[in-house]
Image (tube, coloured by chain):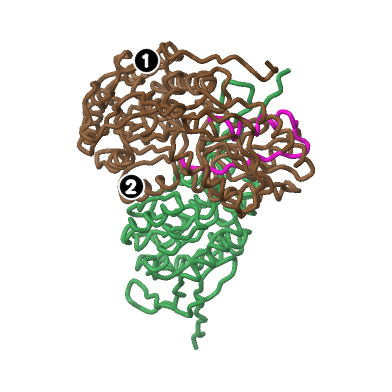
Chain colours: A green, B brown
């Protein structure tokens, strides 16, 4: 007799916890072949706002951690992701209708993305910062700092991107110390929530990454207009009314990353798109 | 005469050779504007200086077309070293004509000649000299080899540092290989128009820099123009928002330098004499018409009375009056509208319980003037602690611990600048880390340098001007 499986309940990931949507809503997630996979939580405006509160609360601790520490935590995510290969390969294969080998390739890329960005945490400041030779008795230094809370729409429906797309937008934001509210791939959200489980056990402080499942068209406008969000990453919003989102973001002068077709490549630019340059002048004594 | 009295020492305006009226500077030539002409006046006397043209949307089209042609045919094909040589020429010409530019600036803007002469104009020359050297070194700007210019840059600048803001905009744009259409502020077009003459003397190819004058509508037409690739704006957060909305959905790259409500934090271990000078420089420099002005003094509670007392003493020695007088510390408010705004907000400050004190100074009969003013016992919720006044008005708040100072300093949607006064280096570094502001001055304030990136966090805008960062704002990586 075969053993009955125990299907997982997929919920949201907010503030380090896994709540259902406060709205009580869920939606059916089906495989590439149309078979029922799970009922995912359908996040509401309130869930999005709760996620922003959690993300704001986590900014101080995460951005205040040492760069070495943030790098180790990001590397730890890669370690744990690698340790749960079977689960992710299965989820990706079911969601995208690809072979296990193709799913494993995507997972490898996702893992390598975390490793690559982990290494940047204690280096990008040197690359992007500067010591400035001002004409006067001052020690003058410019350093990049995190922008703050970043709301994101992960790539939607991209081939080979149900997990990788989300990782490619979230990981670079974390390098500098930003915190994130990300709307997962609407139709293929399950591996995103499983990633939340990895994050929850990788020493990533609660609230640093908050993952919402549901309709980006419904949730994104609330995040774009939210006054406590500092930046809006619309990488995966190409199919939405994204110009309206950019206009809404302008009310509080959020930094906006415009939509990108496909799964974005890992790049230093993505780290630097979500930092602010702070320049500090220190007086030197005249001796 | 007491030791505070001086004989008047006005700078002569005979150095200026102004025209009665100025057109638009498009494609290297002066052309008439199709909009309604207006007058630029001296805010110190309300007397007319010259008639200025207004660029209509059609004129803006023409200017953008000239910039596009110059970009396609000349500027984008020129070697970096030649572009740099033009910028070096401009820097030298500014130095040569420095006195004239300073007088024109003080006349048109109302700022004291000692500031235009010793701060604005020298920095203008420095800005062009600095970016001149970048023009043939773009491979080292941080974007990899062979970075490309963006194309035509639309630049709209404010009235508080007319020529300096022009330099902040034009120098990096040209060094990176862009061409420019720039609109100076309606109340201060004069120095930009003199600068156009300098461009002619430098023999800059026609169309590389075009200067169109006019009011907000001209600026709106410029930043919304479909053939513009880059928008750079310095001004109010309100207009910045409108620009951010207008360019939504386009490929335009944007830099916005907007408002501020900077905290100037004075700890009880600060060198008090220097701090008092720094507070004065922070908020009364340029009549407080400074986006990064230290308009909120956060003073540690135990030295509050001492600092405010010394501040009042110091302010009582400031000389308000003729901007062209070399002894003047406080010049004229730039316009009637701005004076009204400062008055209105100050009245609100009083109504909301702030203790108002103004320096006892003679206010000239004509022109727009506002005595240096302090509001003591201001609450964080007060309008004058939250809204940018853009005038010589200081709000004083107190704190007990560094954590409270940081919380109060960051309690604003703005994030342009901040000041810290303490003799304890470790404290300065720790506090500087926690301030959400793009520029932090430790034991100094309102310092600017072309090598030093400047720009805001949060609603103070985005992008940086100055340094390598400022250059990157006008470049993109090599084609992939």
Q: Chain of mark 2?
A: B
> Which tag is nearer the camera, tag 1 or tag 2?
2
Note whether A164 is above or below B166 in the view shown: below
Q: Is residue B81 left or right of residue B67?
A: right
Position in image of residue B218 (x %, y %) = 29, 38
Q: Along the line of sight, which residue is nearer the eye, B354 or B297?
A: B354
Which residue matches tag 2?
B247
Is residue B445 shown in magenta? no
Which residue does the image show at 43% across and 57% down from the upper left? A164
Which residue does the image show at 46% across and 30% down from the upper left? B367
Q: Which mark is residue B85?
A: 1
Question: Which numbered disc flags the more N-terminal residue, 1 or 2?
Answer: 1
Name the quarter where the C terminus of chain B is drawn. top left
Look at the image and tell me whether residue A262 can be seen.
Answer: yes
The quarter of the displayed image where residue B474 is located: top left
Look at the image and tell me whether residue A127 can be seen.
Answer: no
The part of the chain drawn in magenta is B258-286
């Amino acid at each position: 007799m075969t053993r009955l499986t125990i299907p997982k309940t997929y919920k949201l990931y907010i503030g380090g916890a896994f709540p259902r949507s406060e709205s009580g809503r869920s939606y059916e997630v089906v495989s590439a072949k149309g078979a029922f996979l799970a009922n995912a939580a359908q996040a509401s405006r309130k869930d999005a706002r709760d996620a922003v509160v959690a993300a704001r609360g986590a900014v101080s601790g995460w951005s205040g951690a040492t760069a070495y520490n943030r790098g180790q935590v990001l590397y730890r995510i890669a370690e744990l992701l690698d340790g749960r290969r079977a689960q992710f390969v299965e989820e990706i294969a079911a969601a995208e209708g690809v072979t296990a080998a193709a799913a494993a390739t995507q997972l490898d890329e996702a893992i390598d993305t975390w490793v690559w960005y982990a290494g940047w945490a204690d280096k990008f400041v040197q690359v992007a910062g500067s010591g400035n030779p001002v004409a006067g008795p001052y020690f003058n230094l410019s350093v990049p700092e995190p922008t703050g809370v970043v709301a994101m729409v992960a790539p939607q429906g991209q081939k080979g991107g149900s997990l990788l797309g989300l990782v490619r937008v979230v990981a670079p934001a974390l390098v500098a110390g930003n915190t994130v509210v990300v709307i997962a791939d609407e139709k293929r959200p399950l591996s995103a929530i499983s990633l939340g489980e990895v994050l929850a056990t990788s020493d990533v402080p609660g609230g640093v990454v908050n993952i919402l499942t549901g309709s980006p068209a419904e949730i994104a406008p609330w995040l774009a207009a939210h006054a406590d969000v500092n930046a809006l990453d619309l990488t995966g919003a190409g199919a939405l009314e994204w110009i309206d989102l950019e206009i809404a973001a302008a009310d509080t002068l959020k930094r906006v990353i415009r939509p990108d077709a496909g799964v974005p490549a890992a790049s230093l630019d993505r780290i630097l798109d979500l930092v602010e340059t702070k320049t500090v002048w220190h007086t030197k004594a005249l001796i | 005469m007491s030791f505070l009295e001086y004989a008047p020492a006005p700078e002569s305006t005979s150095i200026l050779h102004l025209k009665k009226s100025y057109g638009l500077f498009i494609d290297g030539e002066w052309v008439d504007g199709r909009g309604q002409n207006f007058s630029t006046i001296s805010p110190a006397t309300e007397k007319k200086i010259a008639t200025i043209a207004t660029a209509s949307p059609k004129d803006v089209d023409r200017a953008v077309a000239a910039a596009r042609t110059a970009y396609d045919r000349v500027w984008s094909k020129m070697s970096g070293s030649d572009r740099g040589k033009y910028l070096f020429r401009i820097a030298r010409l500014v130095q040569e004509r420095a006195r004239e530019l300073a007088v024109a600036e003080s006349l048109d803007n109302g700022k004291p000649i000692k500031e235009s002469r010793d701060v604005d104009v020298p920095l203008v020359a420095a800005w062009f000299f600095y970016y001149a050297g970048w023009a043939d070194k773009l491979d080292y700007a941080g974007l990899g080899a062979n970075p490309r210019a963006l194309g035509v840059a639309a630049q709209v600048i404010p009235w508080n540092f007319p020529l300096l803001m022009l330099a902040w905009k034009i120098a990096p744009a040209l060094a990176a290989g862009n061409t420019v259409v720039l609109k100076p502020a309606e109340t201060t077009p004069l120095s930009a128009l003199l600068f156009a003459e300098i461009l002619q003397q430098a023999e800059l190819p026609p169309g590389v820099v075009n200067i169109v004058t006019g009011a907000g509508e001209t600026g709106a037409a410029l930043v919304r123009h479909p053939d513009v690739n880059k928008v750079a704006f310095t001004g109010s957060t309100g207009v910045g928002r409108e620009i951010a909305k207008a360019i939504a959905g386009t490929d335009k790259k944007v830099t916005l330098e907007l408002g501020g409500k900077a905290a100037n934090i004075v700890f009880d271990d600060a060198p008090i004499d220097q701090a008092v000078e720094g507070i004065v420089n922070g908020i009364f420099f340029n009549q407080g018409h400074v986006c990064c002005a230290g308009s909120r003094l956060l003073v540690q509670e135990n030295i509050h009375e001492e600092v405010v007392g010394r501040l009042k003493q110091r302010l009582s020695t400031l000389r308000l009056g003729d901007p062209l007088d070399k002894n003047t510390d406080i010049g004229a408010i730039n316009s009637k509208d701005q004076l009204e705004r400062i008055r209105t907000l100050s009245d609100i400050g009083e109504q909301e319980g702030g203790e108002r004190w103004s320096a006892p100074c003679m206010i000239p009969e004509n022109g727009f003037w506002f005595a240096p003013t302090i509001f003591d016992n201001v609450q964080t919720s007060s309008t004058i602690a939250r809204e940018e006044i853009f005038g010589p008005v200081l709000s004083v708040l107190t704190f007990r611990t560094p954590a409270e100072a940081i919380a109060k300093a960051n309690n604003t949607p703005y994030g342009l600048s901040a000041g810290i006064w303490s003799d304890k280096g470790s404290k300065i570094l720790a506090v500087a880390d926690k301030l959400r502001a793009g520029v932090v001055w430790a034991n100094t304030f309102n310092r600017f340098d072309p090598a030093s990136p400047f720009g805001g966090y949060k609603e103070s805008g985005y992008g940086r001007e100055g340094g390598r960062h400022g250059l990157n704002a006008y470049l993109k990586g090599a084609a992939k």
